[in-house]
Image (cartoon, helix red, strand yellow):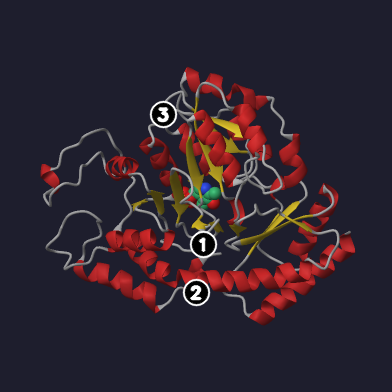
Amino acid sequence: MPGFELFGDAERNEVHDVLDNGVLMRYGFDGMRKGHWKAKALESELETFLGVKHVQLVSSGTAAVSVALAAAGVGAGDEVIMPTFTFVASFEAILMLGAIPVLVDIDDTLGLDPDAVERAISDKTKAIMVVQMCGSMADMNALKSICKTHDLHLVEDACQAIGGTYNGQQLGSIGDLGCFSFDFVKTMTCGEGGAVITNNPDYYTNADHYSDHGHDHVGSDRGAETHPFLGYNFRISELHAAVGLAQVKRLPEFLNLQKRNFDIIRDELSKIDAVEFRRVPEGGVESCAFLNFFLPDLEIAREVSSEFKAQGVDACFHYYDNNWHYVRKWEHLKDMKSLFPLSEEVRNGLNYLGSKTFPQSDSYIARNISCLIKLSWTEDEVRQRAQLMAKIINSAV
Ligand SMILES: *Cc1c(COP(=O)(O)O)cnc(C)c1O
């Protein structure tokens, strides 16, 4: 996945453009910047690649999720349904708005289980946040139809899935709003950065203003702009956007490498009866950022994971025992450990988590291994790696 593996002249040249004219900010300074608008150019490249009308760059993927929810009007006391398997950013971004994360089981796609979503809807639910974890997707048709029936916003966190598609549409572009991260370890990176994407002009305007102190971005005199509503600073810098601009042009090359490496490992592991791959919904094509598979039980998954580490098969994760991506170890959320007082509404809203268990999610995550697919591996290295992985699995099952 990480685009930083292949940094080169393209990234260097884009960054030099910015340093040469000295304008590190994405707005204003029109004369000084000598025609260089890196953030604007990256937004336009992403609009083309993703097939959406609007892209608003922001400072991170976490900011993108908060900005997307805010743009749709989600705020204090509103419930947002999200999966038990995701990065901690999902609940952070919801809590930051004073909204309440409602955690819901995943299924064998490793994404939101539509039946569990339906059961979790209350009169406070405002949005469903689907997370396209590890380069693949939840059952989007079912989730879309639930959102339609209950009049809910569908927000797509596609931070790990750039380049994946569903019925020919890019992941991230299927919901009302989509979010991407360009942090240092994502398929395409800015160092830090993110994007909110949408086809809805009002949501776009909201995201554009909200992420820059509420500025209306009318005219070329920043000091004369008005503030139609409150906002904050989630801007990306020109330096970060410059790196992303070089990377987005290389994205097709990155995605081809990812797929080549993914296919080699998948083909080798598919010879093993005990290995079962995650379900990809009909019409879905993975981005190949990760290869995900299930082993027969928790003990075998633990053994395989520790043997992978011992024998140098790096970048494979057994999320059941990991602090970052699965509800089981989110003690700071369950215990509501906040630096500042949370509102009573949020505290009451989060209370359920202290005692709630997720046996269905456990049954998938306990048996799941997620292997990051690197871009810099040579074909020979991937083949050797695939054989070593198969050998380790075969001796554990
Ligand atoms: C990386 C990631 C984020 C957060 O992105 P940052 O840019 O690191 O803030 C959010 N959701 C998922 C699924 C991610 O993988």
- Residue 85: give its label: none
Q: Residue at x 25, y 33 (%)?
A: 229
**Which residue lies under the disc numbered 2?**
253
Q: Is residue 100 visible?
A: no
Q: Residue at point 46% right, 57% down?
A: 183
Instruction: Work out how far the residue at label 3 is from the one at label 1, CA to CA, in angstroms.
Output: 30 Å
Image quadrant assignment for residue 19: bottom left
Q: Which residue is mark 3?
A: 75
> Which image quarter holds the N terminus?
bottom right
Residue 75 seen in this snapshot: yes
Of helix, strand and loop, which one carries label 3?
loop
Q: Are marks 3 and 1 in contact (CB under 8 Å)?
A: no
- How many numbered marks appear? 3
Name above or below for residue 301 compared with residue 21: above
- Residue in the picture at 38% in, 72% down: 11
Q: Quadrant of the C terminus?
A: bottom right
Residue 388 at x, y percent in the picture: 78, 72
Is 109 or 284 nearer to us in this picture?
A: 284
Among numbered discs 3 and 1, the one appearing first in the sequence: 3
Q: Residues within 10 Å of mark 2 (few under 14, many from 20)?
A: few
Q: On the rendered structure, is 264 left or right of 166?
A: right
Whole-number angstrom distance, CA of label 3 to CA of label 2:
39 Å
**Which badge, 3 or 2, is on the more N-terminal residue?**
3
> Which residue position is annotated with label 1?
163
Q: Quadrant of residue 68?
A: top left
Q: Earlier in the sequence, mark 1 or mark 2?
A: 1
Q: CA distance from mark 1 to mark 2?
A: 11 Å
